[in-house]
């Protein structure tokens, strides 16, 4: 089947769809590199996100924040019923990717994904209006995600949803996260931001095995205990609702350092490098 698509300079070309070929492979045949094709795909997705209605973004982000709580649930339930020890940590961490798998496949808004997807179109055509749309998107999605995380954390802390061993495991995960000082939190969050941005790039270049790729990358995040601003928010807010963590500690030891680290890893490091490698190609 042949379809007409606009090329990078606005010209039309014919795309021949070959069985088993991904969208990025198809585009790469008409662009200088596959990296340029992936960049183009992400830019198109990012531009759509930048144009979305504010309430649609907010509600999707709220749902995403609630869904991300399943990472805490998955890991906490496994931890509660497994013996202690390093080998069993490898098993209990299998629950950590659950929230990411659900949110990404459900196409719900997740702040860490938005450190690269809407950033590339702004880098490609920089303007104050584009920067404003990016900041607007970030504010809406972050607010929605944190509110969703707060709803889930409140339910877990206040309502009799889980048995005692699972509640204890939730607390243990939150306490473990808060053992880091602010600089360590920031440093480790850089890597989680970079990993999520890398995941977004890879998912845009493949058609098969996406669930497996999400699992591999986020399982690595769990094993490395790299803080993620939304998953960590569920854990921290859970401790706050139990009265075991002060707001100031949650904000300045976890919230701000993790947010800045995720942004640095996803936007400043990954998005800038990814854009730089294809800048001449797309121009």
Image (cartoon, rainbow, N blue to C red):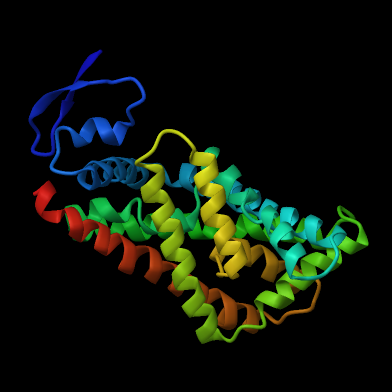
Query: 81 and 42: which one is in front?
Result: 81
* Residue found 56% across the figure and 82% down from its top: 252
- Left-right relation of 53 to 245: left
- Left-right relation of 46 to 238: left
Residue occupying the far front of the picture: 87
* Residue found 79% across the figure and 56% down from its top: 78
Asked if residue 127 is positioned above or below residue 62 in the image, the reply reads below
Q: In which quadrant of the rendered view does residue 6 lie?
A: top left
Q: Give the percent coordinates (x, y) of residue 146.
A: 58, 61
- Left-right relation of 116 to 43: right
- Left-right relation of 184 to 282: right
Query: 215 and 86: which one is in front?
Result: 86
* Residue found 39% across the figure and 56% down from its top: 198
Asked if residue 267 is positioned above or below residue 117 in the image, the reply reads below
Query: 104 and 128: which one is in front?
Result: 104
Residue 108 visible from this viewpoint: no
Q: Give the percent coordinates (x, y) of residue 163.
A: 91, 57
Q: Give the percent coordinates (x, y) of residue 74.
A: 73, 53
Total marks in image: 0
Q: In which quadrant of the rendered view does residue 227 lie?
A: bottom right
Quadrant of the image for the N terminus?
top left
* Residue found 8% across the figure and 38% down from its top: 9
Q: Give the percent coordinates (x, y) of residue 46.
A: 33, 46
Residue 185 visible from this viewpoint: yes
Asked if residue 276 is positioned above or below residue 49 in the image, the reply reads below
């Amino acid at each position: 089947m042949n379809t007409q698509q606009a090329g990078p300079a606005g010209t039309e070309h014919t795309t021949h769809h070959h069985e088993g070929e991904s969208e990025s492979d198809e585009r790469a045949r008409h662009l200088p590199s596959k990296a340029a094709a992936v960049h183009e795909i992400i830019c198109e997705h990012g531009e759509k996100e930048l144009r979305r209605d504010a309430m649609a973004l907010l509600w999707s982000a709220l749902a995403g924040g609630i869904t991300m709580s399943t990472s805490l649930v998955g890991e906490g339930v496994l931890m509660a019923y497994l013996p202690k020890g390093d080998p069993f940590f490898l098993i209990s961490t299998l629950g950590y990717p659950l929230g990411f798998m659900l949110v990404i496949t459900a196409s719900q808004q997740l702040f860490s994904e938005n450190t690269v997807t809407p950033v590339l179109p702004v880098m490609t055509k920089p303007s104050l209006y584009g920067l404003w749309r990016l900041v607007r998107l970030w504010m809406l999605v972050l607010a929605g995600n944190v509110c969703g995380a707060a709803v889930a954390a409140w339910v877990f802390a206040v309502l009799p949803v889980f048995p005692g061993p699972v509640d204890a495991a939730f607390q243990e995960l939150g306490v473990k996260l808060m053992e880091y000082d602010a600089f360590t939190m920031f440093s480790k969050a850089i890597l989680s931001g970079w990993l999520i941005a890398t995941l977004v790039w890879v998912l845009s270049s493949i058609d098969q095995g996406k669930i497996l790729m999400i699992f591999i990358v986020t399982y690595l995040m769990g094993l490395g205990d790299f803080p993620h601003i939304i998953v960590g928010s569920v854990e921290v807010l859970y401790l706050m609702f139990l009265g075991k963590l002060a707001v100031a500690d949650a904000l300045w030891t976890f919230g701000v350092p993790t947010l800045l680290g995720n942004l640095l890893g996803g936007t400043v490091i990954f998005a800038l490098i990814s854009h730089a490698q294809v800048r001449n190609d797309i121009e």
